[in-house]
Image (cartoon, rainbow, N blue to C red):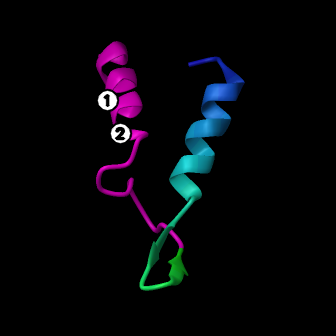
Amino acid sequence: MSDGRILDLIRKMLKTGYIENGHRYETEAGTPQGSVISPLLSNISDAIR
């Protein structure tokens, strides 16, 4: 993938973290369950196979 804007968006979304009971936590690995980025990553994965 060569579109820098999309890559920046993906990086930001993967580093966003999550909020639980009013506390913000860093994302250690993977994507949050039900994240809006999941379909995008799935499409990219399918396209490169």
Say what amino acid the circle numbered 2 marks: Ser
Classed neighbour count for the residue bearing mark 1: other residues with Cα under 10 Å, few (<14), some (14–19), many (≥20): few
Find the distance from the CA under tag 2 to the CA under tag 1. 6 Å
Instruction: Please say whether residue 7 is one of the residues in the magenta stretch.
Output: no
Asked if disc 2 and disc 1 are in contact, CB closer than 8 Å, the reply is yes
Residue that numbered label 1 is attached to: 42
Residue 41 % position (x, y): 39, 32
Residue 15 % position (x, y): 57, 57
Q: Residue at image x 46%, y 68%? A: 28
**Left or right of residue 22, residue 29 in this image:** left
Q: Residue at image x 60%, y 45%? A: 11
Say what amino acid the circle numbered 1 marks: Ser
**Left or right of residue 21, residue 39 in this image:** left
Quadrant occupied by the N terminus:
top right
Residue that numbered label 2 is attached to: 38
Instruction: Please say whether residue 30 is one of the residues in the magenta stretch.
Output: yes
Q: Give the range drawn in magenta.
A: 26-49
**Which type of secondary structure does the marked residue at label 1 adopt?**
helix
Residue 32 % position (x, y): 37, 57
Position above or below: 44 against 7 = above
Q: Residue at image x 69%, y 27%? A: 5
